[in-house]
Every structure is written in structure tokens, then in C-alpha cells.
Amino acid sequence: MLTNPVLISVIVMVALSLLKLNVLLALIVAAVVGGLVANMGLMEIMETLIEGMGGDSAETALNYILLGALAAAIHKTGAATIITQKLSKNMKGTGKSLVFIIAFISIFSQNLIPVHIAFIPILIPPLIMVMNKLKIDRRAVASALTFGLKAPYVALPVGFGLIFHNIIRDEMADSGLELVDGEIWHVMWIPGLAMVVGLFIAILFTYRKPREYKPVEETGTEYGLQEHEVEDVVFNKNHVITVIGAVAALVVQLTVGSLALGAILGLGIMLAGGAIKWTGIDSMVKSGIGMMGFIAFVMLVASGYGDVLRATGGVESLVDSVSGVIGNNQLVAATGMVTIGLLITMGIGTSFGTIPIIAAIYVPLAAELGFSPMATVLLIGSAAALGDAGSPASDSTLGPSAGLSVDGQHDHIWDTCVPTFIHFNIPIMIFGIIGALIL
């Protein structure tokens, strides 16, 4: 197992990221290493990597860039600044309540208003000044955002969570274990509770102390997003048009299913209503590319990287290796199963895509070891959920980093990936293993 190409590739990717090599380069290098270990040729590796960057991944990249442009436009009008000024005047103390509010808002991005990371570039950059004033440790905010992006789909069968739970149900059925609709959430609340515990530890204990950041007036903000002047922004006609454009973008995304089309419509409404100027469109697009372009390219390369890992054949052999050495010890088996899920998800960057890979092996293996059907659900769900938090290539970490690093004072790896890995993956592993043994 120690020579498995997926294992070696993921270790290389994580190690390079921790050493602060750019995530894009870390993914490419890790893909090459994994492919070479699997005896793939260099040209074959690169062709697989590039081919994997098309299709849905290209659409995702376009969505993120247009989303960034819409966020820049909303910020430019000062609509979001009104919220921050209200918060700035009313927030007192250490700012823990603001962090919990951000976590609460984030939860609805997965179910009630399923926009995923779309709200981050709109909500977070204008709040940077408030966070600095309250001396909030942004690692706590990163944890709150990742919690809101992940915990709801893990635990709740609505929005993205319904998709996640249905994939678990369908893949288990394909492997011979039929479940009644709605049964999945009966145990998936356990990893969800683990994330709640991790969130409280992060906010109330690990990152409770005030942390000093340089003021925005000194650092400025990247991507053309500048804070408005100190005087109050008064709600006006342009803000009404901005709200209409933002709501229209949301409606289109929820009804038609196209975030790109929604962003274009929102920008069109703001342009037609005079909230933004024709001469400012170019700067809006450049701001969008600056803010979300990096995420877009990372997601493209991550998709190609996932294809390379699959092409090595190492994913299946990794699962087989573990199943062959765990014996009849349920504790060892549960630990091995969730650990493999962590490695796979860290590598391919998606919990949803991990389920089909592991379910085919885990269902018969769990039955052979005497795990109940609900324990099997918990093992598969926990194994798949692991890694989405903490992965350098996951949008659950890239999104928070994009919002929190607009003034250059938040590091993607050490301020987002490492804190979310510690506070969410470790509790999910513990709760998942213990829960599977009890059920």
C-alpha cells in the first residue's frame, strides 16, 4: 500500500501545499508524481490532466469568474457596505457573535438558498474592516464559513444535502444494500454533530484570542475592491437597483440552474438601471477574474488531477489493500475505511465524487464484518465527507480564502486548510468510527 500512486500523490500534494508552493503547481506536480508511480508516460499524464479540465469543470470556472464580477459590482455600489456600517456600529466585544452569524448565514447557502460559495465574495470583503476593528482571528471565520458550506449537506436531506444523501442511497443500492428513502439522515446527523463540536472548539477556544491585522487604509484591498469612505453610505436608487439585480441573479440560478446566466442578468440590470457605468464594466470583469479566477483555475486543475488519480488505478487498489489487511476487527476496519475516504477526497476534491468509488467495496466489506446497515451508511457518509474540509483544492476552502484574503493577510493553507482540517476532519473521524461501532 505504501507504493500506491494515489497515496503517494496525495502526500506530495499536501506536503507541497504546506510548504507554501502555489496550489496550482502542487496539484500539477502531484499529478505527475502519481502518474509516474503508476507507470504512466508523461504525455499520457498531461493529456489526462488537460482532458479532465473540460466539461462541467469549465462551466464551474466560468460561473466563478462571472460571480466575482457580480460581487465586485455589488461592492462598488456600496450596497454591501451599508450592512457592514450597521454591524460596525452595533457589534461589541470580541466579535464571537459575528463569527456565529457568519456560520449561520453560510448554512443557508446549502439548502434554503442553495448558492454554495456564491455569497462569500459579496458578504465577506466588506466585513474585513469590521473584523479588523473587533480583532477577530480570521481562522475562526474560515472555520465558520467551511462549516456552513459542508455541515448542512452532510447532515440535512435538503438542497445539496438531498443530492449527497441520494448518492449514498443509490450507490449502496447498486452494491446490494437497499434503503428506504429518508433513512440516510437518521445517522448522518452524527458527522454533522461532530462538525458543530469542531466549530465551537475553533471559535470559543482555539481562536478565541484577539488577533491584530493591519488596517485596510494601510494594506488596501486587492482586485480593485476598495473600502468606501468613512462617512455613512445612504441607501439610494442605485442600491435598490443593485438589490433587484442580485435577487434576479438568484432567481435565475434557482429556476434555470445557471449561475453564469444569473450573474450576467444581474450585471445587465445594474447596468441598465445606472447602478454601474458602461465605462466601469471592464474593471468589474477584471475584479471578478482577480477575486474568483484563482478558484476557477484551481478547480479546473483539481478536476484534471482527479482524472489522473483515477487513471492510475490506485484508488481501487488502495481500497482493496485496506480491505485485505483489516481482518475481523471492527475498530481497525472502521478506522481504515474512513481514513481511505479522507485520502481519496483530499485528492479528488469532492465528497460527492468519492461515494461511488468507495461504496462498491465498503458495502460488502461492512456486511462481512458484521456492521449494521445504518453503521454502513455512517461509514460511507463519513468517509466521503472527510477531506472536503482541509483540502487545498476544495471549493469549501478556496471560497473562504478568496473572501478573507482580499487584503493579503490571510493564507489559504495555514489560515484556512489547516484549521478546518483539524477542527472538522478529526471530529468526523472520531464520531464516525465510534458511531459505527455502536449502531
Image: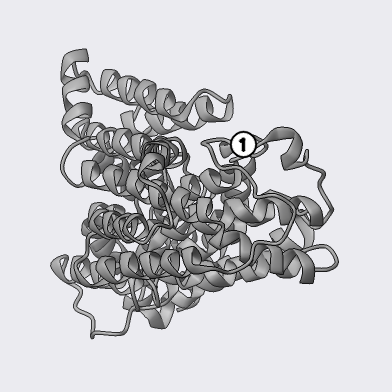
- Whether residue 111 appears in this view of the structure is yes
- Whether residue 198 appears in this view of the structure is no
Locate the N terminus by quadrant.
Answer: top left
Corner quadrant of residue 241: bottom left
Q: Is residue 317 left or right of residue 108?
A: left
How packed mark 1 is, by other alpha carbons closer than 10 Å (few <14, some 14-19, many 20 or more), is some
Q: Position of residue 349 (x, y in %)?
A: 37, 45
Q: Which residue is mark 1?
A: 411
Q: Is 315 placed above or below 160 here?
A: above
Q: Residue at x 24, y 23 (%)?
A: 38
Q: Position of residue 363 (x, y in %)?
A: 26, 64
Q: Is residue 374 left or right of residue 23?
A: left
Corner quadrant of residue 281: top left
Q: Given the image, on which type of amino acid does mark 1 rest? A: Asp
In this view, the residue in front, 413 or 372, is 413
In this view, the residue in front, 66 or 410, is 66
Q: Position of residue 121 (x, y in %)?
A: 49, 52
In this view, the residue in front, 390 or 367, is 390
Q: Is 50 placed above or below 115 here?
A: above
Q: Residue at x 83, y 62 (%)?
A: 94
In this view, the residue in front, 412 or 91, is 91
